[in-house]
Image (tube, rainbow, N blue to C red):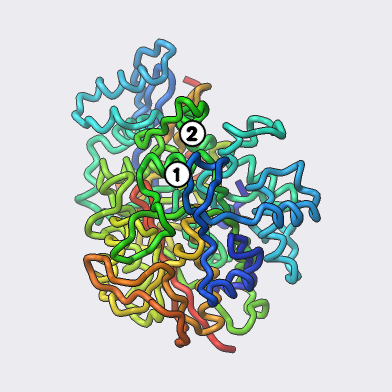
């Protein structure tokens, strides 16, 4: 990603909630939860879903990338009543990942590889866009603000932090979920941060590249 | 806040390899969508809007790109090269940033890779590196992949970067190439029309797919803007929060996005709608426009000319809007004959002269995404 100008940020925005999902572990605002991981990523995501005790049948239709985003959203927003604070159109989503929707792209390609078994499926094809996860999260949590999806080789805390800061600072958007959700055969990563104005929130850490990175590194090293 | 001026642009589509050539075809009413046999895309005949591959090969050859770069990369590089060719801007400078918009990039490599490109070439971040390396940019290009609003979102981000003084020049380029991947997917969705698409018409029965690339160069430097002086005023996005593959019945997200962008300013002369020609999309747009009191403003869809060019659509169609402003011409909505949306809107039936000083461009896409952006003209 480009080197974004490092103007001094006004620092009136805070990380008021965050969640991360890794193999065998989930972090909800730094509080660790252990989940049994047996080597099968999809089964693992399903087991987390079951542990939440929610009834959301659409979960089973989602591709793995959206399942991962959905679960991260559940941990991120558990117990948080965004509706009481904001109009749905004031909550933005600023997301990125590395592999776009490649896992499902490969699945879709497999349905058209052999002319004799040419059978593309709409239920697969619809997930061949990375921003579908933003649609799933918006539906689940009634979020109607601006959505943007960037693709970068690695999570770029500097860019994501400053982009979000400027979005909240220069538009009528009031809160933002910043996300990195990546899923491939070789593994997955998910981190989400809820960013709000200090005045509206019991303040957590300030929105800054260092704070985003520090939370991700702390989780990775556990 | 700095103003954002349009400095240069280029469109590569079935209608030609330059903005001028494209617009000439629009004025003449020539559609680039042709029903044909495209066995590399789909086993049966279907309508598609394709870039002339012989001409592409020749032009890519002039830049020595045929063997080293995919068609997707060639189109992006050619489009950017053409857009900046008469400008004095230093593309290598740290105050210049390229934003790329694409839905699927090099996805075709998953199935067709006769030249043996490395596996990482399928990644959009790799495409950004390739384009950045070609031009020797100081900044790695930024990639936005936001379904069919990718192009408009890239322009919105670029306008903000200029307004905030982060960059002096923004080069916004979009591209998607038609592939078996994309065609098979839309066919499985049953959303493709058997005939050339007819946005907003009562006989519309689905979209036509297209491919292309386009580039818009933006700058805060007013002296670089040509006459007439075109500006991007603002943009906004919104999610329907309703369905991942169908538009909201009430046009909720589009309503929010347009409302935000117009900000009480009703003086829009022309609307370039998304207008895919699927029954639901066009209906949704008519409902959103009616809710906003914009039902009498002349509106068209450019997709009857070049099909749905996906990640490039927002950029190609925005450049067509710039041309309507430069020439004071309202371009007809190709394929439209009889109203066919649940709310009556003022679809442009014949290409005609008219003062076009303020244009609203909209886009909607899978994932419930919607975006709107506003352009104005000032004669110097």
Q: Are marks 1 and 2 in contact (CB under 8 Å)?
A: no
Residue depicted at x 40% and y 50%: B192
**Quarter of the figure with residue B68:** top right
Tell me, yes or no, if residue A70 can be seen here: yes
Q: Earlier in the sequence, mark 1 or mark 2?
A: 1
> Badge 1 local density, few (<14 within 10 Å), some, or many (20+)?
many
Residues A114 and A109: in front is A114
- Tag 1 subunit: A
Does B23 appear above or below B366? below
Q: Look at the picture and state if B305 lies above or below B367.
A: below
Left or right, residue A50 beside residue A147? left
User: Do pointers 1 and 2 mark residues of a single chain?
Assistant: yes
Q: Disc 1 versus disc 2: distance between alpha carbons?
A: 19 Å
Q: Is residue A102 left or right of residue B18?
A: left
Checking the image for residue A105, the label placed there is 2
Residue B222: x and y in percent read: 62, 78
B225 horizontally vs A123: left or right: right
Q: Image point 33% across, 66% down: which residue? A: B200
Locate residue B221: give its quadrant. Answer: bottom right
């Amino acid at each position: 990603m480009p080197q974004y100008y490092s103007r001094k940020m006004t620092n009136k925005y805070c990380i008021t909630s965050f969640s991360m999902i890794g193999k065998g572990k989930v972090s909800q605002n730094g509080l660790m939860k252990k989940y049994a991981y047996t080597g099968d990523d999809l089964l693992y995501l399903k087991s987390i879903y079951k542990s939440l005790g929610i009834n959301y049948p659409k979960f089973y239709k989602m591709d793995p990338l959206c399942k991962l985003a959905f679960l991260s959203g559940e941990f991120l927003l558990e117990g948080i009543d965004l509706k009481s604070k904001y109009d749905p159109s004031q909550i933005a989503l600023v997301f990125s990942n590395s592999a776009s929707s490649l896992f499902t792209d490969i699945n879709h390609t497999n349905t058209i590889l052999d002319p004799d078994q040419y059978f593309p499926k709409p239920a697969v094809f619809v997930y061949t866009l990375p921003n579908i996860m933003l649609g799933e999260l918006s539906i689940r949590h009634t979020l109607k603000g601006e959505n943007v999806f960037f693709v970068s080789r690695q999570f770029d805390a500097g860019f994501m932090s400053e982009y979000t800061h400027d979005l909240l600072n220069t538009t009528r958007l009031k809160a933002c979920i910043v996300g990195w959700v990546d899923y491939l055969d070789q593994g997955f990563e998910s981190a989400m941060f809820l960013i709000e104005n200090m005045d509206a929130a019991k303040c957590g850490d300030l929105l800054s590249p260092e704070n985003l990175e520090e939370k991700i590194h702390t989780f990775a090293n556990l | 806040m700095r103003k954002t001026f349009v400095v240069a642009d280029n469109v590569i589509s079935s209608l030609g390899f330059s903005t001028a050539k494209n617009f000439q075809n629009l004025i003449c009413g020539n559609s680039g969508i042709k029903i044909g046999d495209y066995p590399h895309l789909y086993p049966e005949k279907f309508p598609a809007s394709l870039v002339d591959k012989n001409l592409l090969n020749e032009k890519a050859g002039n830049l020595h790109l045929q063997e080293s770069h995919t068609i997707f990369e060639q189109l992006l590089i050619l489009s950017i090269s053409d857009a900046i060719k008469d400008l004095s801007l230093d593309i290598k400078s740290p105050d210049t940033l390229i934003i790329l918009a694409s839905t699927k990039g090099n996805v075709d490599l998953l199935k067709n890779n006769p030249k043996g490109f490395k596996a990482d070439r399928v990644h959009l971040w790799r495409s950004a590196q390739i384009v950045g390396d070609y031009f020797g940019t100081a900044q790695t290009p930024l990639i936005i992949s936001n379904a069919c609003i990718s192009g408009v979102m890239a322009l919105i981000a670029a306008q903000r970067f200029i307004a905030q003084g982060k960059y002096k020049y923004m080069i916004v380029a979009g591209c998607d190439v038609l592939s078996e991947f994309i065609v098979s997917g839309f066919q499985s969705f049953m959303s493709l029309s058997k005939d050339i698409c007819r946005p907003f018409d009562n006989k519309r029965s689905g979209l036509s797919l297209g491919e292309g690339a386009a580039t818009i160069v933006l700058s805060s430097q007013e002296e670089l803007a040509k006459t007439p002086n075109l500006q991007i005023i603002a943009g906004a996005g919104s999610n329907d929060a309703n369905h991942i593959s169908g538009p909201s019945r009430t046009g909720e997200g589009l309503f929010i996005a347009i409302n935000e962008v117009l900000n009480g300013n009703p003086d829009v002369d022309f609307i370039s709608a998304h207008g895919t020609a699927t029954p639901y999309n066009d209906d949704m747009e008519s409902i959103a426009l009616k809710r906003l009191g914009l039902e009498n403003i002349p509106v068209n869809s450019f997709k009857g000319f070049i099909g749905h060019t996906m990640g490039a659509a927002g950029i190609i169609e925005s450049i067509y809007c710039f041309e309507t402003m430069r020439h004071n011409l309202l371009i007809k909505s190709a394929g439209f004959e009889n109203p066919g949306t649940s709310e009556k809107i003022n679809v442009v039936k014949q290409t005609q002269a008219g003062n076009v000083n303020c244009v609203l461009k909209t886009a909607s896409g899978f994932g419930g995404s919607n975006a709107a952006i506003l352009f104005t003209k000032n004669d110097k």
